[in-house]
Image (spheres, rainbow, N blue to C red):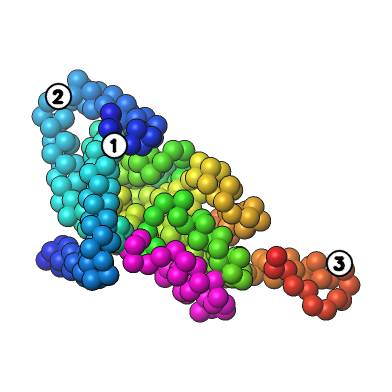
Amino acid sequence: MAERRRVSSFEWSTAVIGGVSFSAGLVVYLRDGAARFTAILTNDLGLFASMLPKMAAGCLVSAFVTRLLPREVVARLVGTESGLLGLLIATLMGAALPGGPLTIYPVAGAFLVLGADAGTAIAFITAWNLLGYNRALIWEMPFFGSDFVFWRILVALPLPFLAGALARGVLRLLAARRGADRGTEAGSDTST
Amino acid sequence: MTFLIVNLLLWVLVAALALTAAVRSKALFREGATEGARDFVMLLPRIMIGVVGSGYVAAIMPEDLITTWIGPKSGLLGITIATLAGAITPGGAVVGFSVGAAALKGGGGAPQVIAYSTAWSLYALTRLINWEVAMMPPRVVWLRAAVSIPLPFLAGVGAMLIGHP
């Protein structure tokens, strides 16, 4: 697909999926006939079309939130919190902050610099991966439909928090073992 | 009805954000609106290809094979298989979602597909290697990968227990 705006936005993933889709469509057409081919097409396009308003809203919400909620603010908000509240805020922010990996990882890195622990950064990244409305609205809904996405997100709700807490547990365990190896030493601070 | 309400709420949110941006400055509003519209137009063909393609791929895949491996009755083993498949699926978002949708349309169980898409979201190896390792302290990346291992199972089992979708 030729794109004039940004040549670099050609994606191998899309090209591969396009090729596979075309071949699969051809097989269906030749094997099952035109009626089945059209039935699948209209069924899928119907779902896709019904999700268009949500996708458009998702794109606009992302574009505005990116401008109204600067990364620095998010980094400060999460980076200076600790404890369970820190995990909760990290989860909320991970779900709220739109953008791709180029946005998310630097923000998570900034938390660490500002003094947050790895658990907080992990809760944030996990929330972005699993709860981000951006991805849910724009990508997931046209593929799976709203009902599926709703339940998928519902079961995923506790997971970022859990991942962050688990990471803290692992770090504490490692620190304790290191402390035991060294004999009892006071003031073992593992943060860098 | 819920469909309309969700759409309505979303667009109320869009309006509120657009208004907030416009109050701050006209340029901010214009930038936001242009970028949102451009993203939408750019993503449309990509997502459409994936959505339609997943329907055709599902139609030519052997249904009994999918049902045996990751069907609604495949239980924990199916969730495990789906998790592994999700973790090793290469490529960008369009690949992950197309494969997941094809599996669901082709007879896969909802908890299994949820496990697949959760594993894919958490691991997507190309993203992990290209971006995460480059931008985060390696210690944090590996810790995240390690603590993420139980999450796709929990999501799949959670969906199985709830009995939805």
> Which chain letter matches label 3?
A
Q: Residue at x 34, y 54 (%)?
A: A135
Q: Decide: marks 2, 3 in contact (CB < 8 A)?
A: no
User: Is most of the magenta stretch helix, strand or loop?
Assistant: helix
Lateral position of residue B106 relative to residue A43, left or right: right
Horizontal side, residue A176 vs residue A79: left or right: right
The vertical placement of B24 against A59, above or below, is below
- Which amino acid type is marked by label 2? Gly
Reading the image, the residue beneath label 1 is: A5
- Residue at numbered disc 3: A181
Mark 1 falls on what kind of element? Answer: loop
Residue on which disc 2 sits: A33
Residue A74 in view (yes/no): yes
- C-beta proximity under 8 Å, tags 1 and 3: no
Q: Element under label 2?
A: loop
Closer-to-camera residue (A134/B31): B31
